[in-house]
Image: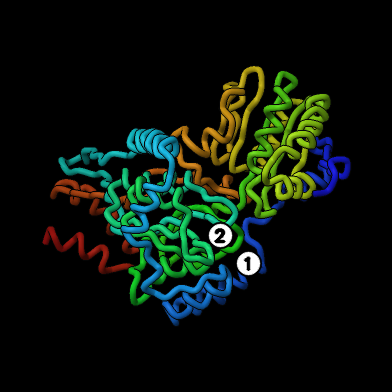
Amino acid sequence: MAGRKELRIRVVKWRPGAESATVTAFLKREAFHPRAEEIARDVLERIRNEGNRAVVHFAREFDGVALQPRQFRVSRAEIDRAARAVDPAFRRAVREARKRIVAFARKGMRKDWRMATPRGGRLGEQFVPYDRVGAYVPGGSAPLVSTALMTVSIARAAGVPEIAACTPCGPDRRVNPFVLHALDSAGATEIYRLGGIQAIGLMAYGTSTVAKVQKIVGPGGTYVTAAKRQVYGHVALDLVAGPSEIAVLADEHADPRRAAADLLSQAEHGTGWEKTLLVTPSAALARAVRRELVRQVGDLSRRAAASEVLRKGTLLVIVPSLDDGVELCNRFAPEHLEIMTRNPRRWTARVRCAGAIFVGEWTPESAGDFVAGPSHVLPTGGAAAMFSGLTVDDFRRRSSVIEFTRGDLLDALPVIETFGAVEGLDAHARSARLRFE
């Protein structure tokens, strides 16, 4: 690792109307990367045309694992062995996290509803779970057991009967036992030892041995994110959930140790595309956070990856005021936004674009990643300006329900006939009119 003295973390000033080229470049990170798009397109096309044969080929090429189609699915015996292999503390942690995630999901689940029409009919909505969904759980750089819970548990709470999960295995074909146990505990009905683009293709198109899903959820790196985007239409998708990012809005009262630790919690993921941003009106805090980042990164097991993010993907921005700071955070539209100020709730209401908001000094982003309750599958790459995080209703289909009486249709007939005439759709108007002839 490069010496700590060589670690340069950028500190810049910014205010509205006097744009910084450095800040502008930082904000304009891409949600999709051209090379990943190109590779994903070629791989997906082959999987769509060749099925299992292509999946076998790319599992060997990208992950160095030799698999036959009959080996894609993890057996019940392997799952049971994984349960015996993990320690009791982990099993308790899984139970506790799942309990909180399911409780939050059930509380937020929208209910069927009805309203009366003017002439005695009914309008409303009903919600029905998907029949079959796919969950992608990354495992290349870290065994993301929390993602298993943050996707599959919610699908189960929504009532989805078939939940197929894909997660990478090693060259020895083994899946991390902690991930296996988490997936099984969360309620996955099928688990496949496949990762990357080939896993997305398998779930989106199906093969002769694996049924296609109706929707794919879950985060991933650059290539998985590109693959998900390209299968949209063949399946439904949750959101753009790529490399992690965090913004911390802080004032002079914030603890620089905590702010630095929270920034590093996302820098350590290790894809190289992570983004970490501190926004503060306090120059003294920015300098203190920079010192803490340099000091703390040396203690991390993933210090090389985190250091790379500190060099290339980290920015400490000094703003004239917290009002300006909130505006900058909204422009960044981060996956995670922490508010570490004297009165954090005041600023929460001003946030327009963030996947999740962490309020106050006792709410580190890691609480949301692991146990708080809301899913940690959140929009990245600026997509929080357009998308929201994964919720229980992402696993359900919404249908409008319209039930007119004779009186309702008679009242609406002039509108139907007028629109039918303007739009040149004679059959539309006739289908309503003939009921009274």
Tell me residue 375's x, y (percent). Answer: 46, 41
Q: Which residue is mark 2?
A: 225
Q: Residues within 10 Å of mark 2 (few under 14, many from 20)?
A: many
Tell me residue 143's x, y (percent). Answer: 52, 50
**Which colour style is shown?**
rainbow
Disc 1 and disc 2 in contact, CB within 8 angstroms: yes
Which residue is nearer to you in this view: 270 or 393? 270
Q: Which mark is residue 36?
A: 1
Q: CA distance from mark 1 to mark 2?
A: 9 Å
Q: Is residue 104 visible?
A: no
Dot 2 amino acid type: Thr
Which residue is nearer to you in this view: 204 or 6? 6
Which residue is nearer to you in this view: 279 or 36? 36
**Residue under the image location 75 percent in, 25 percent down:** 321
> Which quadrant of the structure image shows residue 291?
top right
Quadrant position of the C terminus in the picture: bottom left
